[in-house]
Amino acid sequence: MSNKKSYYTFEEPLGTTVEFQATSLQQAMVIKKKKAQELGIPKEAFELTRIRKKPSQSA
């Protein structure tokens, strides 16, 4: 059984970036809301900046 997951990257104006794997944009929005709450940042501040098949290579 093959899951077609993509990596979604969201960024807010002050430079905070969150990237995670999700199966759909709808699921990504729910995860974004939870991550924003954890960081104490309004979910509306985050913009979707990238969708890719592999995680970004952050050094």
Image (cartoon, rainbow, N blue to C red):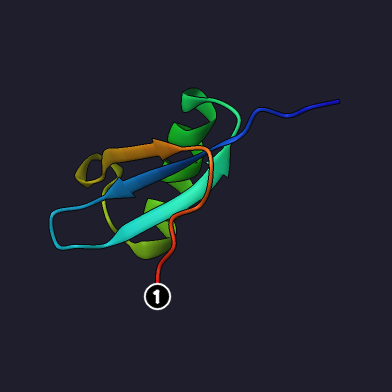
Q: Quadrant of residue 6?
A: top right
Task: Name the residue at 49% across, 24% down.
Answer: 26
Task: Name the residue at 21% across, 52% down.
Answer: 12
Residue at the limit of the structure toward the right, as seen here = 1
Task: Name the residue at 27% across, 41% down.
Answer: 49
Element marked by disc 1: loop
| Quadrant where the N terminus is found in the figure | top right
Above-or-below relation of 56 to 53? below
- Determine whether, in the image, residue 49 is placed left or right of residue 9: left
Residue beneath disc 1: 59
Q: Horizontal and vertical percent for residue 32?
A: 42, 44
Above-or-below relation of 33 to 12? above
**Front position in the image: 24 or 51:** 51
Q: Horizontal and vertical percent for residue 42?
A: 26, 49
Q: Horizontal and vertical percent for residue 3?
A: 73, 29
| Figure label count | 1
**Front position in the image: 59 or 22:** 59
| Quadrant where the C terminus is found in the figure | bottom left
- Determine whether, in the image, residue 15 is placed left or right of residue 58: left
- Please state which amino acid type lies under the numbered disc 1: Ala
